[in-house]
Amino acid sequence: MGKLTVKGIEKILRDKQAGRYADGDGLYLHVRDGGSWAWVYRYAFGGKRTDLGLGSTYTLEQARTRAAVLRQAVKGGRDPTEERDREKARLSIPTFKEAAKACHVEQAKGWDAKHAAAWLATLEQHAFPTLGKLRVDMIEPSHIADTLRPIWLTTPVVARKVRQRIGAVLNFSYAHKWRATEAPVKSVTILLSRQPKGGNFEAMPWAAVPDWMARLREQPETIARLALQFTVLTAARSKETRFAKWGEIDLDARDWNRPAEHMKRRIPHTISLSDAALAVLEQAARYRTTKADCLIFPGKSGKPLSDMTMAKALRTSGETATVHGFRSTFKDWASEQMGHIPDAVSEAALSHAVSDAVIAAYRRTPFNAMRRQLLDAWASYVSGGGKVVRLSAAS
């Protein structure tokens, strides 16, 4: 039986009698100068004595019940303070909808208004109905697959965008320590059927790229076919290749420094060049007619190649996929075959918006070096008969 009584507590609080009043078994009523008060549970754990505040919302009976639960935790080898902190952390974890909006606010700073609106709208339409109320730490591959399945075969282009944006939200959450893992890209792919070729299907399956690249190299060399190879090897956008100039290439550093005006997000971006990409540049140099800075892959009259010219080079190689679709192909390959390389690395290689929080999560690792490793492995895969080169996540 405890020492305190309800009437006794009422008198102590009414008279504002400052002090600590023991009820027994570690439970105390602590009254401060001025009359504010709270329950306190005192316990010993790991050779250390700790006073754990329980607040002032409990009645005497409730405080005794809470103290009894805490005593059992100590007997079971659990620190009540650590359990309280874990519970607070759990309660502060946002839902997917809340995390998506926070991610959108951060990343949209580098987007144009149209893309920013579309990014959030696709999640509102296709992801929030099923994932919106789930805490981000509770989202499993099956939840994502169930979300994507209704649109996976009917509108595959939209479905892939939704999958990528769900992944961006979960990676954002991982960087903020709201969940223990990054987006489960490979597991989600296993749970979904293969999308049919044709219709809206833009990307060539990554398993087909090595044979296609071999066939492309066997065809007569043209500037458009070289530009197409370079685009695939660097996972670049078509415009970035078509407008590329020799002055952007740093052969010593093996880098392609792309200016802001050629980038979708209007932010300068550097991409590493693999041996295969450098070999394509060596071939393209034969078409150079001046030592001054000029286009690497010039069209007629020295003007940039058109989208149609590169698309024609792809079609005459016997494929119906789009040039831009190779970026999706690269992303799928990186997710499914290079799982030891963090997802944020492939996002950065594609010059997608990667939040500062995500980059900060990898600050202790050679982030740029990992991007180079990833693109070198991609080039080796597509140019070397389809063999995956396993690279470590750090060097």
Image: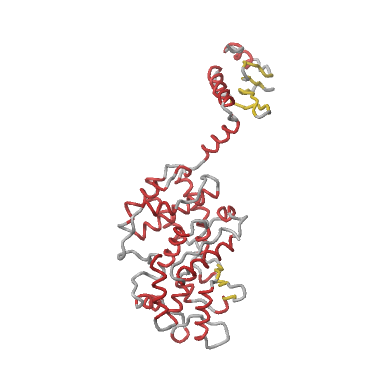
Identify whether 6 is placed above or below 390. Answer: above
Q: How many marks?
A: 0
| One can see residue 220 in this view | yes
Q: Residue at x 42, y 74 (%)?
A: 213
- The residue lying furthest to the bottom in this view is 289
Q: In which quadrant of the rendered image does the C terminus lie?
A: bottom right
Q: Position of residue 203 (x, y in %)?
A: 38, 65
Q: Nearer the viewer, residue 156 or 268?
A: 156
- Camera-side residue of 219 and 232: 219
* As drawn, 184 above or below 56: below
Q: Toward which corner of the image does residue 268 lie, by quadrant?
A: bottom right
Q: Where, quadrant-wise, is the N terminus in this rendering?
A: top right
What is the x, y in percent for residue 269?
Answer: 55, 67
Q: Position of residue 85 (x, y in %)?
A: 58, 35
How far across and down, in percent of the image, does residue 189 sit? 39, 54
Which residue sits at x=33%, y=71%?
Answer: 320
Figure colour scheme: secondary structure
**Residue found at x 53% / y 54%:** 106
**Quadrant of the image occupied by residue 6:** top right
Q: Is residue 265 left or right of residue 394?
A: left
Residue 114, visible in the rendered structure: no
Nearest the viewer among 293 and 350 is 350
